[in-house]
Image: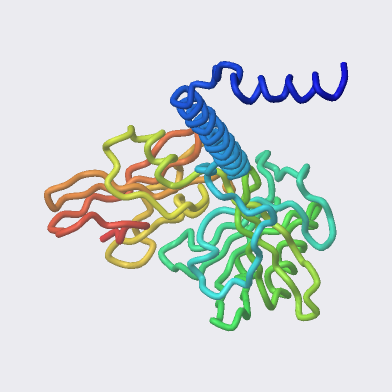
């Protein structure tokens, strides 16, 4: 092909262009569609990230715990009022001796009872033949002081060790500490000397006066229960025209040791109420009936 032929070819192409197959409207429509797809895909991806992040946040949030809160470590504090000690306590150690396996002549463990009489500051502890007992004081500053009624203690010549332990633990104590119950562990009471050394440790009795009264007299009949005391204290309940002339429970609870858990209970209504003494897993004894009252009484009765 010479130069003249090439010029002729270009002239022909310009004069008769190839047919234009491009549809402008279709192209515009297609472009908009592709743009919408890209925008939708981008927005969907963004929403996917937000939803995923939200899922992560929700998963990471802890479940709400509605179970009761139990201290991981028990709380210990000084005893600053007599009311904190009221009740029955079972000895774990006295004077550095493990006494959990000890039983008195009646087969009971060593126990201490606070406020088991009409006097809320009374105390009583196990001895082999008879209880050791007395009164105590507690100050708001945490000082504890106990006095023993040694004159009423009956010593067994062959077994006096526990009386000695109990007397020393109480009369040498200058402070008392309570450790609150935690989980399945009961509350504990520790008596301390002036150098903050442990003289005795007790754990709380696991029954209430109401439970003892209901078991002996029937649930629903008891209008007042307490305090927790001992069989010896119920037996010694007295009154009358002169102190001690009336003792309705002297022979109560035959076969039950003096240190057995007991309680005072009241039944009745409409101004007339009857007092009973009950012993754990045992019978009841009627102590007195009093009329003309405006509300249910509590504690040991006043026998006239």
Q: Residue at x 66, y 20 (%)?
A: 12
Question: Is 70 situated above or below 115?
Answer: above
Count of numbered circles in the view: 0
Q: Quadrant of the C terminus?
A: bottom left
Foreground of the two, 304 or 85: 85
Residue placed furthest toward the right: 2
**Whether residue 255 can be seen here:** no
Can residue 26 be seen in this snapshot?
Answer: yes
Residue at position x 44%, y 68% in the image: 119
Q: x, y percentage for residue 303? A: 29, 59
Point 56% across, 33% down: residue: 38
x, y (%) of residue 82? Answer: 51, 70
Of residue 236 and residue 92, the one placed in the foreground of this image is: 92
Left or right of 295: which side holds 247?
Answer: right
Q: Nearer the viewer, residue 68 or 36?
A: 36
The quadrant where residue 212 appears: top left
| Figure check: 221 above or below 244 | above
Q: Is residue 216 left or right of residue 162?
A: left
| Colour mapping | rainbow
Q: Nearer the viewer, residue 109 or 86?
A: 86
Q: Position of residue 107 (x, y in %)?
A: 68, 39
Image position, residue 89 (x, y; %): 61, 54
Q: Which residue: 87% across, 16% down?
A: 1
As displayed, is residue 191 above or below residue 128? below
Q: Does residue 169 appear to the left or right of 21 in the view shown?
A: right
The furthest residue to the front: 4
């Amino acid at each position: 092909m010479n130069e003249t032929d090439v010029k002729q070819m270009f002239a022909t192409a310009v004069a008769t262009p190839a047919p234009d197959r491009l549809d402008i409207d279709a192209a515009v429509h297609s472009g908009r569609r592709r743009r919408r797809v890209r925008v939708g895909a981008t927005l969907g991806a963004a929403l996917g990230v937000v939803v995923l992040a939200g899922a992560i946040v929700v998963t990471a949030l802890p479940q709400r715990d509605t179970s009761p809160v139990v201290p991981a470590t028990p709380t210990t504090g000084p005893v600053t009022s007599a009311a904190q000690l009221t009740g029955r306590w079972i000895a774990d150690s006295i004077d550095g001796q493990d006494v959990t396996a000890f039983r008195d002549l009646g087969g009971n463990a060593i126990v201490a009872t606070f406020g088991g009489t009409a006097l809320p500051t009374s105390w009583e502890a196990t001895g082999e033949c008879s209880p050791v007992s007395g009164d105590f004081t507690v100050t708001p500053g945490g000082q504890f002081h106990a006095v023993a009624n040694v004159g009423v203690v009956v010593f067994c010549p062959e077994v006096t060790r526990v009386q000695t332990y109990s007397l020393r633990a109480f009369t040498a104590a200058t402070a008392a500490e309570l450790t609150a119950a935690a989980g399945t562990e009961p509350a504990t009471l520790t008596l301390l000397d002036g150098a903050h050394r442990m003289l005795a440790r007790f754990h709380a009795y696991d029954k209430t006066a109401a439970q003892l009264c209901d078991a002996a007299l029937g649930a629903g009949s008891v209008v007042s229960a307490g305090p927790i005391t001992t069989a010896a204290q119920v037996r010694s309940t007295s009154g009358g025209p002169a102190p001690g002339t009336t003792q309705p429970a002297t022979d109560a609870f035959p076969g039950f040791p003096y240190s057995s858990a007991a309680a005072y209970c009241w039944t009745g209504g409409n101004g007339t109420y009857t007092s009973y003494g009950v012993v754990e897993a045992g019978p009841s004894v009627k102590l007195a009936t009093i009329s003309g009252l405006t509300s249910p009484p509590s504690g040991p009765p006043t026998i006239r």
